[in-house]
């Protein structure tokens, strides 16, 4: 009897061990939860194409993320450049400032380059370096991962082993999404108040914040009337064309209305949440985890 019991106990232990091994294997083989990055070795020298309306989408995102003081400053810069151009074009006008108005405007907008850069990167869906090609998707299943491709989580869950060097490179290419932080405030009113506070903080010289966006901002819903920036940029664009210059694409994009398609839907930002995107130069720093 003792031998039978011992044999049964031994069999149970072996079975449990096998189940444990199989369980570990199944957990290791489980596909990561979305959003995910799908990467593969680069096979040719082509770059992922950008959307035809990429510029206007980026400028719309940037305008939505601006603190009121920054938005007013950009508006004043555009209006001033337009007034100078119109004075130069008028036989009765006089431009007392030195230098080309458009060149001066572009130099004056340089402090906002980190914001414009982050806005462009947030709206991308694919990237490439000399070594790898990367695309983003909701999940591995939705991405239809092909031969030679690897599916990895956009961010590692708690307790996950260190990512491979290739996954690290992929996340760096997709830095605007991989380094994003979502703050859940619970209600739309609290999220709006938080966004207002963080946008003011983003104007500080040493702030790590590039963009602060709400779910409505990411929806790119068309407005009934042109915004003040769109109207000012349209007027500037007309003056630039009449003067015989080529409109800079960033400034021209402010005047155009993008197609209504959500930005970064894989991040799943909902009402009551605030999306915070870092500056590229601040990737090693910690984004605020609160609105204080």
Image (cartoon, grey):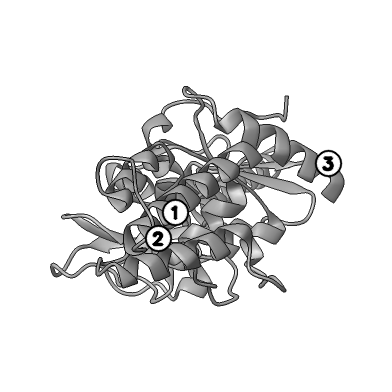
Among numbered discs 1 and 3, the one appearing first in the sequence: 1
* 180 versus 126 height, above or below: above
When asked about the image quadrant of residue 183, the answer is: top right
- Residue that appears at 39% across and 49% down: 117
Characterize the local packing of mark 3: few (<14), some (14-19) or many (20 or more) Cα atoms within 10 angstroms: some
Which secondary structure lies at badge 1? helix
Q: Nearer the viewer, residue 205 or 49?
A: 205
- Residue that appears at 43% across and 41% down: 112
Q: Which residue is mark 1?
A: 83
The number of numbered discs placed on residues in the rendered structure image is 3
User: In front of the other: label 2 or label 3?
Assistant: 2
Q: CA distance from mark 1 to mark 3?
A: 40 Å
Q: Which residue is mark 2?
A: 86
- Residue that appears at 32% across and 57% down: 88
- Residue that appears at 34% across and 75% down: 146
Q: CA distance from mark 1 to mark 2?
A: 5 Å
Position of 115 compared to 6: left or right?
Answer: left
Q: Are marks 2 and 3 in contact (CB under 8 Å)?
A: no
Q: Residue furthest left?
A: 45
Q: How far from the left and from the top, in percent, is residue 139? A: 53, 65
Q: Are marks 1 and 2 in contact (CB under 8 Å)?
A: yes
Q: Which image quarter is the C terminus in?
A: top right
Q: How far from the left and from the top, in percent, is residue 37? A: 42, 58
Residue 252 is tagged as none
Which secondary structure lies at badge 3? helix
Characterize the local packing of mark 1: few (<14), some (14-19) or many (20 or more) Cα atoms within 10 angstroms: some
Q: CA distance from mark 2 to mark 3?
A: 44 Å
Characterize the local packing of mark 2: few (<14), some (14-19) or many (20 or more) Cα atoms within 10 angstroms: many
Position of 16 compared to 189: left or right?
Answer: left
Q: Which residue is mark 3?
A: 190
């Amino acid at each position: 009897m003792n031998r039978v019991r011992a044999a049964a106990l031994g069999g149970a232990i072996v079975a449990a061990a096998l189940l444990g091994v199989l369980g570990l294997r199944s957990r290791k083989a489980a596909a990561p939860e979305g959003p995910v990055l799908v990467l593969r070795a680069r096979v040719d020298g082509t770059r992922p194409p950008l959307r035809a309306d990429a510029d206007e989408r980026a400028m719309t995102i940037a305008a939505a993320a601006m603190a009121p003081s920054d938005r007013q400053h950009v508006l004043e810069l555009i209006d001033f450049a337009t007034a100078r151009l119109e004075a130069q074009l008028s036989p009765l006008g006089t431009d007392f400032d030195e230098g080309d108005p458009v060149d001066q405007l572009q130099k004056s907008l340089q402090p906002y380059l980190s914001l414009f850069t982050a806005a462009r990167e947030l709206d991308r869906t694919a990237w490439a370096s000399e070594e790898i090609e990367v695309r983003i998707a909701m999940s591995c299943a939705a991405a239809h991962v092909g031969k030679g491709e690897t599916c990895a989580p956009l961010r590692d869950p708690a307790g996950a082993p260190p990512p491979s060097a290739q996954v690290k490179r992929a996340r760096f290419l997709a830095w605007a999404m991989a380094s994003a932080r979502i703050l859940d405030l619970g209600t739309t009113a609290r999220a709006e108040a938080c966004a207002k506070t963080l946008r003011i903080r983003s104007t500080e010289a040493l702030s790590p914040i590039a963009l602060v966006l709400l779910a409505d901002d990411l929806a790119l819903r068309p407005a009934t009337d042109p915004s003040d920036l769109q109207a000012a940029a349209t007027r500037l664009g007309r003056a630039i064309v009449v003067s015989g210059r080529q409109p800079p694409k960033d400034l021209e994009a402010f005047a155009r209305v993008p197609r209504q398609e959500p930005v970064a839907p894989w991040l799943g930002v909902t009402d009551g949440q605030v999306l915070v995107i870092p500056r590229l130069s601040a990737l090693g720093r910690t984004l605020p985890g609160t609105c204080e």
